[in-house]
Image: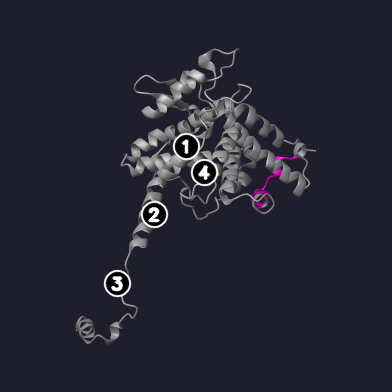
Amino acid sequence: MKEADFPKHLSYFLSKYLPGQKNASTYTIASYRDTLKLFLIFCEEEKVMRPERIRMSDITKELIIGYLDWLEAKRGCSISTRNQRLAVLHSFFRYVQKESPESLYELHKILSIPSKKHPKPMVPYLTGPEMQILLEQPDTSTYEGFRDMALLSILYDTGARVQELTDIKVKDVRLSSPSVITLHGKGSKVRRVPIMSKTSELLARYLEIKKYHPGIARTDNYLFANQKKQQLSRWGISYILKKYVDMAKSNPLFTVDFPVTPHVLRHAKAMHLLQSGVNIIYIRDFLGHVDCSTTEVYARADSEMKRKAIEDAYIDLVPDIVPKWEEDGDLMNWLNSLCE
């Protein structure tokens, strides 16, 4: 019986290749792990293939397509999630084809599986007035409320990803002019983003009343911590945001009909910068995008918003009855003269 080589490749990919050769972050590795874990669940539950006995010869293009369809049908995943899972599998099998060249033909067929096309939704974001209403919700007379006010302000003002926000330590904050915060982004990339003077004043006050962990140097404390003085999780930030969004909905001017996640505040900052006339190159660097193609989604969203505003204000001057061109004698004579 042939050795089950799939588990060996999977183990080396996650424990050696990604952290050692690709220098992937723990969050990236966790994302890859979750995708491959779901694939093993699919193999075991739907195909009765025990994970420890899977061989590379068992992996086919049809099996992968079946897994992707299962994600949509049984797991209720969106098309974008399906495409993200496929990208992870492509990365894994590109690694495997170098380690297992005898499977090259079948792996090549798997790598040829395309992403599934789907309509791209408009970028969800809060308008300036809506953002102001949201920031008015925390009760700043309490410590937790003041912390939440600082958290939401920093999340918006820096345009940080939620993981970047959780990773901020006190030593990453510089309040002397010009005030900046150092963010540790994807792929271990570090960038410094400026914060507005009002946000800087708010943050200075927060650092004065902040409850620090006694066993850690002040500068090594996480900027935002939970009740146990430990790093606030992504889910903790999402919970805090949802609480104040629900409160803001009591205001009739807060007309938001989509889920407000931490990333929506990042979208809001980008859109507000664009609408203020900031060059898209600067917005790209501010958000930590690799190239402008990612940032251009905000320009397209802004153009769509302007188009809809023009349509709403458009007065239709075209008559309901369009004349038949074939009944226009002058036009017909001119067309006939072209053939002479």
Label 4 with label 2: CB-CB less than 8 Å: no
Classify mark 2: helix, strand or loop.
helix
First reached walking from the N terminus: tag 4 or tag 3: 4
Q: Amino acid at mark 1?
A: Leu
Q: Main secondary structure of the magenta part?
A: helix
Q: Amino acid at mark 4?
A: Ala
Residue drawn at (62%, 38%), measured in percent from left and top? Answer: 101
Q: Nearer the viewer, residue 49 or 286?
A: 286
First reached walking from the N terminus: tag 3 or tag 2: 2
Compute the Cα span from label 4 to label 2: 27 Å
Q: Specify few, some or many for label 3: CA neighbours under 10 Å numbering under 14, 14-19, or 20 or more.
A: few
- Front disc: 4 or 2: 4
- Front disc: 1 or 2: 1
Label 1, on which residue?
Answer: 135
Query: In this rendering, is residue 133 above or below 68?
Result: above
Classify mark 1: helix, strand or loop.
helix
* Magenta stretch bounds: 54-69
Label 4, on which residue?
Answer: 248
**Residue 186, can we see it?**
no
Q: Position of residue 177 (x, y in %)?
A: 34, 21
Compute the Cα span from label 3 to label 1: 44 Å
Classify mark 3: helix, strand or loop.
loop
First reached walking from the N terminus: tag 4 or tag 2: 4
Label 1 with label 2: CB-CB less than 8 Å: no
Residue 285 position by quadrant = top left
**Residue 211, can we see it?**
yes
- Front disc: 3 or 2: 3
The disc at residue 304 is 2
Residue 55 position by quadrant = top right
